[in-house]
Image (cartoon, helix red, strand yellow):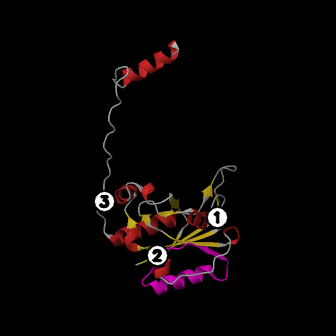
Amino acid sequence: MSTARENILSRVRSSLRRLDGGAPASVPPVRLTPSEVAPEVRTEQFRTALELLNGKVYAAETPEAARDRVQALVGDRPVVMTNSSVLARCGIYYESVATPDAAVGITGAEYALADTGTLVVMSATEARLASLLPPVHIAVIESSRILTGLDELLIQEPRPGDRTASMVLITGPSRTADIEQILVRGVHGPGEVHVVILM
């Protein structure tokens, strides 16, 4: 081992108060703080946060109302949709086209985070594509699945990799300011995000 490298490692060990060859310190416990917020407050916080990001939120009192809202948003545009229990519960069904040809992607969402207006989609490849590739994303979620924030999500799902291939966090329509520092929506994903909350 070179002298310079050993000097660097020696300084690191000294800073960490560790002896040469000693075991690393144990990892500190995870500190997650659950928040007690009433469901109706979480729903309103989610709406406010997502609308600040130019997302649209609709409340549906019944599964039929959720289906009707989705139909109004889709119109006659081509759709790709996922196999989601909340979509089935609402009777939402479209014959899916190939994902690159879809104007609208329809998914369920496992959770939503009230503090940031974020959707949490756990899925295989088809749900990632349906939520990210079409220019319009419509998500349907039950109000009981709206959590206060990331801490509560990690309490609910401490090991998401055991359940799913991916956990995608979607916070509003796609936006970037890379080009001349001008905010542009829809460059790297949907330019429109609509969330239908089944109350």
The quadrant where residue 80 appears: bottom right
Between residue 126 and residue 67, name the one nearer to us: 126
The quadrant where residue 26 appears: top left
Q: For the residue marked with disc 3, what is the amino acid?
A: Ser
CA separation, marks 1 and 2?
A: 22 Å
Indicate the position of residue 33 as horizontal and vertical percent values: 31, 53
**Label 3 environment density (alpha carbons within 10 Å; few <14, some 14–19, many ≥20):** few
Position of 78 with respect to 163 (left or right) is: right
* Picture residue at 49% right of the left edge, 64% below the top: 121
Give the SS element for disc 1. loop
Between residue 82 and residue 195, name the one nearer to us: 82
Residue 133: numbered disc: 1
Farthest residue, direction top: 3
Indicate the position of residue 105 as horizontal and vertical percent values: 60, 71
Q: In the rendered structure, which segment of residues is drawn in magenta?
A: 57-86
Residues tagged 2 and 3 counted as in contact (Cβ below 8 A)? no
Residue 35: numbered disc: 3
Q: The C terminus lies in which quarter of the figure?
A: bottom left
Indicate the position of residue 59 as horizontal and vertical percent values: 45, 78
Q: Earlier in the sequence, mark 1 or mark 2?
A: 2
With respect to residue 151, does 97 lie above or below? Answer: below
Q: Is residue 106 magenta?
A: no
Residue annotated with mark 2 = 85
* Picture residue at 49% right of the left edge, 65% below the top: 50
Between residue 118 and residue 14, name the one nearer to us: 14
Q: Is residue 66 magenta?
A: yes
CA separation, marks 3 and 1?
A: 34 Å
Between residue 26 and residue 56, name the one nearer to us: 26
